[in-house]
Image: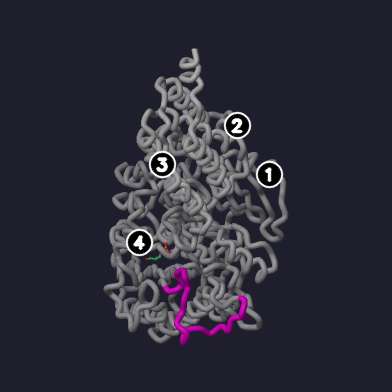
Amino acid sequence: MQDMLESKFRPVGPWQWVILVCLVVKPLLFYYLMNIEINFTYLWVSTALFLILFFSSFHRLWIPIVFYFLFSILMFCDVTFNAYFNGYLSVSMLGSSKYLGDVTDVIIEVIQPRFFLLLIDLPVLIVALIMNKHKRTNKRWPLVLVLVVLIAILVVGSVTDIVFLKSMGNLEFFSYHIKDVLAETTGFGLTKIEEEDPLDYEVDESDLLFGIAEGRNLIVLQMEALQNFVINRDYYGHEITPVLNNLIKDKGTIYFDNYYMQIAAGNTSDAEFATNNSLYGSVNSYTYEIYKNNTFRGLPVLLKERGYSTIAMHGYDGSFWSRKDMYPAQGFDTFIDDKGYKPSKIHGWGILDHEFYIQSVEYLIETPQPFYSFMVSLTNHTPFEMDEELKTIELKDKHIGTRFGNYLNSIAYCDSAVGVLIDELKKAGLYENTVIAIYGDHFGLAQYDVDNEVVLTDFLGKPYRFDEMANIPLIIHIPGEDINQTISIAGGHMDFLPTIAHLLGFEELNTIYLGQNLFTAESGFVIQNRYAPLGSFIADDIIYFMSMDGIFENGKAWKLDTGEAVPIDGLKHLSDRSKGLIMLSEQYLEEDKLAEDKEE
Ligand code: GP9
Ligand code: MN
C-alpha cells in the first residue's frame, strides 16, 4: 500500500522545484519585456503551463532542457526584434540574416541589458540536470496530448473571429511561432483577397501645378535618416538645416510637412521601392531580394518611355540590399555604386555626402538629358558620429555623447552637403532645368530607445511618439517657378509616384500603383506596414495604432498635433482597408502582376 501511494504521489525533488520556478518566471519576464498589455495574466499562465507540460512529457530531463535553451534564445530574439519592429520575429525574416553584420550597430542600439535576464536561468538548468537524482515516472503521453490540444486551440483560434482566442493565439509565444512556421510552409491562415482595381490617377489639367515640371531633368535625392523635426528648427539659436530651410522658402518649392516613411523590413530599400513604384515593401522579407526577378513599371520605366535616361547612384557596396539586381529590374540604365566613387576618406559606411554629390554631378554632366537621377545619400547613418572638424553645432552638456547630439551634428553636415550639390548643379549648368525632390528614407532616432524618447520629448516640448518618429520631409524644388507652398495633407513614400507624375504632366499613369496624387486627393491615407502593427495608419490629423494582437478594439488613436487620445469609433473600415491594401500589394508582387499585364 505504502509503495503504491509513493508511486502515485511521488514527492517532487528539490531540483525539480528549481526547474518549476524557472518555467513559471520565464514567461512572466518574457511578456513583460515584450511590453504586452493585453491578456497579460492569461498569456503568462498559458505559456508557463505549456512549459510545465512540455517538461513533464519526457522521461529524460536533458531533452526538454535542450529545447528550453532554444526557446530562451528565441525569446531573446523576439524581445530584441520587438524593440525595433513592434512584433514577434518571423521565419521569413530569417532570410534577411545576411545583413546582420551590416546592422550590428542598430542591434546594439536596440538590445537592452535587461533582455539578458531571459538567459540567466540557463546555467541553473544545467546544474539542475546534473544534480537531479529524482527518477521520472512513465505514462507521459496523456500530458503530450493535453499540450498538443491546448496549443492547437490557440493556433486555430488565431485565425478565427473569436476575439479572445485570436488575441491569445497571436500573442502566446508557442502558438505564434507554430502558426508562423505553418503559414510559411503551408500557407496556413493566409487569406487570398479579392483583387481591387488600382486607384484612379486623377488628372486635373486646370491645376496650376499640373505639368509645371514637364520635360525637365529629375533628381530624386533620398536622404539617409532625414526626419522632419529638424526642418525649420533651431538648436538653442543655431539653425540646424539652413540649406533645406532656405530651399523651402525659395521660389519654386513645394514642401510636404505631413509626409511619412512607409517601409517594411527592407528599411532604406523599401523607401526606394515605395517611392519609385508606389507599392509596399513586403511585410514578409526584403522586397529587393525576394522580388528582384519581377517586372516593374515604376518611375524609371515610365520616364524612359518619355525619353529620359535613368541613372541610380549610391556610394556603397552595390550588392547591399541587392541593388545591383534591383536597379536594372526597376528600369535604371546605369547604377554607380561605391566602385564608381573616389572617397578622400571613408566615413562610417563610406563616402562623405559632399564628395558623393560632387562626383555624382560629374556623372550627370555626361548623362543624356532629360535624365532621371535617383541618388541615395549615406553619411547620416546611425550612429551619426562625426569627426570633430565636421561638427558645427555646439552641444549642451546634457546632449554631448547622446545619439540625439550626434544626430544634430550629422544632419547639419548633410544639410550643408545638399548646398554643395545645388552649387555643383549650378556650376554644371544643370540646375535651372532640373527638378530636385528631397525626402528622408526613415527615422534616425528610434522612439523605442528610451534615451531618445526622453531627450526628444524635452527638446520638442511634446511627447516623442511613433508619428513624430515616422515624419519625414518631402521638398520638391522646381527652379524659377513662381510658386511656394507648404502642403499638409498626410502623405508618404507611396504617394510620390502619382504626385510627381502630376508635376511632370503625365496624362495617365498606366501602371499598378497604390498611393495617391497628393495634389488632387481629398484626404491623406498613410498605411504603416512594419514598424507599427498591420492595420495602423495616419489620416491627415490622426494616427490609429493597431494593437500587437491584431484586434482593432485594442488599438489606440491620437491627434498628430497634440498627442491627445481620440475615440477609435468609425476608424475600423480604414484599418481594414489598410490591411487589405498591404495584402493586395503583396499579392501583386507574389503574382508578378506587372509581368502578367505586359503579356496581355
Ligand atoms: C546602405 C544604406 C543603409 O546602402 O542604404 O541602409 P539602412 O541600414 O539605412 O537600411
Ligand atoms: Mn537608411
Say which residue label 1 marks.
568
User: Which of 104/475 is in front?
Assistant: 104
Task: Tell me residue 567's x, y (percent).
Answer: 72, 45
Helix, strand or loop status at disc 2? helix
Rounded to the nearest angstrom, the CA distance separating label 1 from label 2 is 19 Å
The answer to whether residue 486 of the structure is visible from this angle is yes
Q: Amino acid at mark 2?
A: Phe
Helix, strand or loop status at disc 4? helix
Magenta stretch contains residue 386:
yes
Q: Amino acid at mark 1?
A: Ile
Helix, strand or loop status at disc 1? loop
Rounded to the nearest angstrom, the CA distance separating label 4 from label 2 is 39 Å
Secondary structure mostly taken by the magenta-highlighted segment of the chain: loop
Q: Which residues are magenta?
A: 379-398
Mark 3 vs mark 1, foreground winner is 1
Rounded to the nearest angstrom, the CA distance separating label 2 from label 3 is 29 Å
Rounded to the nearest angstrom, the CA distance separating label 3 from label 4 is 30 Å
Magenta stretch contains residue 381:
yes
Name the residue: 55% across, 50% down: 33
Mark 1 vs mark 2, foreground winner is 2
Say which residue label 2 marks.
164
Say which residue label 3 marks.
587
Say which residue label 4 marks.
101
